[in-house]
Amino acid sequence: MALTDLTLAECQTYRPELAVPSDLDDFWARTLGADEPGPAAYEPVDTGLTQIRTFSVTVPGYAGEPVHGWLHLPAYAEGPLPCVVEYLGYGRGRGLPHEKLFWAAAGFAHLIMDTRGQGWSAAPGLTPDPHPYPAGTVPGFLTRGVTHPDTFYYRRLVTDAVRFARAAREHPAVDADRVAVTGISQGGGLALAVAALFPGVAAAMPDVPFLCDFRRGVRVAGRGPYLEIAEYLKLHRDRADQVFRTLSYFDVAGLAPRATAPALFSVAMMDQVCPPSTCFAGYHRYGGEKELRVYEFNDHEGGEGHHQIEQLAWLRDRFGPGVAAGGGEDRAALSS
């Protein structure tokens, strides 16, 4: 596999002029303040595992619509716990309850958000996206409602993501001052958006983030969701300005200067889905303290397990070593 985008040296100086809407802050204030979210609900799930307790989660997302997820807690940990909120990659749902246990095994609370309308059919409790999409779409999610910011699919998804971060801070097992957001690809883009829009976040770990620098992504991506925009504009030749104006409200590189929490980014230099220049656009514009790990010879898989080790060490430096195993007397309080 060869480089398909800028070199590392070129990416390090790549700072595009983005079309940031003048009413960007007003749009998101109106969106996130449109309703008062109700409390999240947690139902214990018997996974057969003895060292991690799991709860099926329902959080009121956009317009109060129920969004599902999983909460994992170390079984005998003394709290309150630092928490990692995870958003998922494109087309991914919350999956089965035993599949993502890394952060809970490391002593953290771990809240995973299902992705409305996405996910695979065998997973229980999928979150629907019941909204109609005007003006047509192409297969996928990136053109759903793309003719106007108010109807765009990602308006709802970003709102869901903010609501999950808020729910994490409100859970009695969680230390509200130690909540981090993370995700790979689409999940990394959502983590960036939440860090920019929700000041309650204490750390962000966007991994090969999607939703950055849309115009360049559409032009240089070799595969993946950015190409949905190109396919849509092949059919609707007169809508390019309209589409890219909508996308400008959701370009997390445009939102990134509003973030203040420390962040650990990753970029893969042979990434054909989220071209490295687009990820660097988000990294360079990020408003908080930031670090970067570069995987020079990787495609969209990025650092995978190697990068998880980097994330754990980085987060422990900021949040402490997680929690030590404690007695069973605290279990009732932590599970409420």
Image (tube, rainbow, N blue to C red):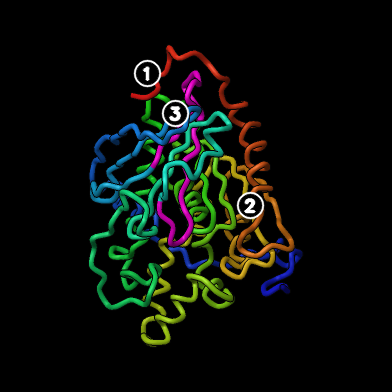
Three-letter amino acid code at the position of disc 1: Ala
Mark 3 and mark 2 lie on one chain; the one further toward the N terminus is: 3
Please tell me which residue lies in front, 232 or 90. Answer: 90
The image position of residue 201, as x and y in percent, is 48, 38
User: In this orientation, does residue 177 appear?
Assistant: no
Three-letter amino acid code at the position of disc 2: Glu
Please tell me which residue lies in front, 198 or 218. Answer: 218
Q: What is the quadrant of the N terminus in the image?
A: bottom right
CA gap, disc 3 and disc 1:
16 Å
Q: Which residue is denoted by mark 1 in the rendering?
A: 333
User: Residue at (24%, 49%) from the top-left corner?
Assistant: 65
Q: Residue furthest front?
A: 48
User: Residue at (59%, 44%) from the top-left corner?
Assistant: 263
Mark 2 and mark 1 lie on one chain; the one further toward the N terminus is: 2
Tell me, for residue 123, which label it has, or none: none
Of circles 3 and 1, which is in front? Answer: 1
Range drawn in magenta: 70-93
With respect to residue 132, does 335 lie above or below? Answer: above
Q: Residues within 10 Å of mark 1 (few under 14, many from 20)?
A: few
Q: Residues within 10 Å of mark 3 (few under 14, many from 20)?
A: many
Q: Is residue 53 left or right of residue 261?
A: left
Is 86 part of what is drawn in magenta? yes
Tell me, for residue 176, which label it has, or none: 3
With respect to residue 323, does 162 lie above or below? Answer: below
Please tell me which residue lies in front, 199 or 295. Answer: 295
CA gap, disc 2 and disc 1:
34 Å
